[in-house]
């Protein structure tokens, strides 16, 4: 049986690295995308060493449509076939409320967070054989269910990708399965204090924030779930169940 192949965008760092590491343990060969050359996070480096998974890194700037168009062909050229799984994990973040919004900022965010994933999905399905049915998993955000005014360009772009998940599932039909995972706050940046993270976790219906491994669990489930398409799994401790006035970083600050 041919080893399965996964392309993970933004696959060397943070949640992307955790997803890629889990896929390595699941027996996948890995096409690991990053905007620029970089070392893998320890969780991924350790998984690659432990499993001996075949992997190759692909540099592509997803803000450049030409580089987006070249990514799937580059993977096919390297591995000799199209991926069985595409995880659209890479994302562009940006601060700002509606008063700060510009057409240029919105266009830049939409290109990386919506247009690139959609075009990669299109290219994957076009490159796949008639007998294969690849799985596509889009990483969106729990805020798509409960919008907040912060980071508005980012929020709009993730909402667009969320809607694209269902639309592409219908459009591709039996040629590909398209699903999404919507994480909540998972890996806090330096903008958060440890005490703030504890308070935010206590806000969640489950009393805890998700871990990268739990995000990866959901991706693996959707990769396997042959009867599932057009669905979104919220892995957020329940954050999407109740509205919040602001994004996490602005809540419960010290």
Image (tube, grey):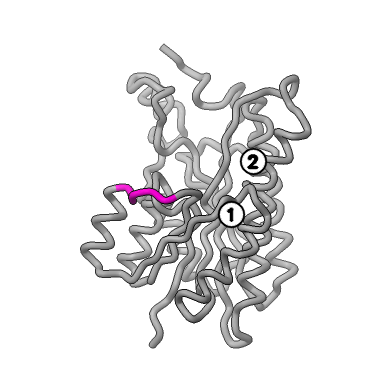
Q: Main secondary structure of the magenta part?
A: loop
Q: Which residue is mark 2?
A: 144
Disc 1 residue crowd, few under 14, some 14–19, many 20+, Cα 10 Å: many
Labels 1 and 2: the sequence-earlier one: 2
Screen quadrant of the N terminus: bottom left
**Picture quadrant of residue 79:** bottom left
Magenta segment: does it hold 38? yes
Residue 203 position in % (x across, y down): 45, 26
Residue 123 position in % (x across, y down): 65, 69
Q: Which residue is mark 1?
A: 232
**Outermost residue, top side:** 254
Instruction: State the CA–CA distance, disc 1 to disc 2.
Output: 11 Å
Disc 2 residue crowd, few under 14, some 14–19, many 20+, Cα 10 Å: some
Q: Is residue 77 above or below residue 13?
A: below
Residue at image coords 48%, 41% = 236
Local secondary structure at mark 2: helix
Screen quadrant of the C terminus: top left
Query: Which range of residues does the magenta coloring cover?
Result: 37-41
Left or right: where 157 falls relative to 94:
right
Left or right: where 146 falls relative to 234:
right
Residue 249 position in % (x across, y down): 50, 24
Q: Nearest the camera: 42 or 35?
A: 35
Left or right: where 230 falls relative to 28:
right
**Picture quadrant of residue 51:** bottom left
Q: Is the residue under label 2 in contact with that under label 1 (CB below 8 Å)?
A: yes
């Amino acid at each position: 049986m041919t080893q399965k192949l996964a392309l993970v965008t933004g696959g060397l760092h943070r949640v992307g690295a955790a997803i890629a590491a889990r896929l390595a343990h699941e027996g996948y060969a890995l096409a690991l995308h990053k905007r620029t050359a970089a070392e893998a996070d320890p969780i991924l480096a350790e998984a690659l060493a432990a499993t001996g998974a075949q992997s190759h890194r692909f540099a592509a700037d997803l803000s450049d449509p030409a580089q987006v168009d070249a990514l799937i062909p580059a993977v096919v050229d390297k591995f000799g076939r199209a991926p069985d799984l595409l995880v659209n994990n890479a994302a562009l973040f940006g601060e700002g409320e509606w008063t700060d919004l510009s057409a240029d900022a919105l266009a830049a965010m939409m290109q990386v967070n919506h247009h690139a994933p959609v075009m990669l999905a299109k290219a994957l399905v076009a490159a796949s054989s008639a007998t294969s049915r690849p799985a596509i998993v889009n990483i969106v955000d729990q805020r798509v269910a409960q919008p907040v005014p912060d980071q508005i360009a980012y929020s709009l772009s993730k909402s667009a990708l969320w809607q694209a998940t269902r639309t592409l599932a219908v459009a591709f039909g039996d040629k590909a399965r398209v699903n999404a995972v919507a994480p909540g706050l998972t890996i806090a940046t330096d903008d958060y204090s440890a005490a703030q993270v504890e308070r935010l976790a206590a806000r969640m219906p489950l009393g805890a924030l998700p871990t990268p491994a739990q995000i990866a669990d959901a991706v693996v489930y959707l990769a396997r779930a042959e009867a599932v398409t057009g669905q979104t799994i919220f892995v957020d401790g329940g954050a999407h169940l109740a509205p919040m006035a602001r994004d996490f970083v602005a809540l419960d600050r010290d």
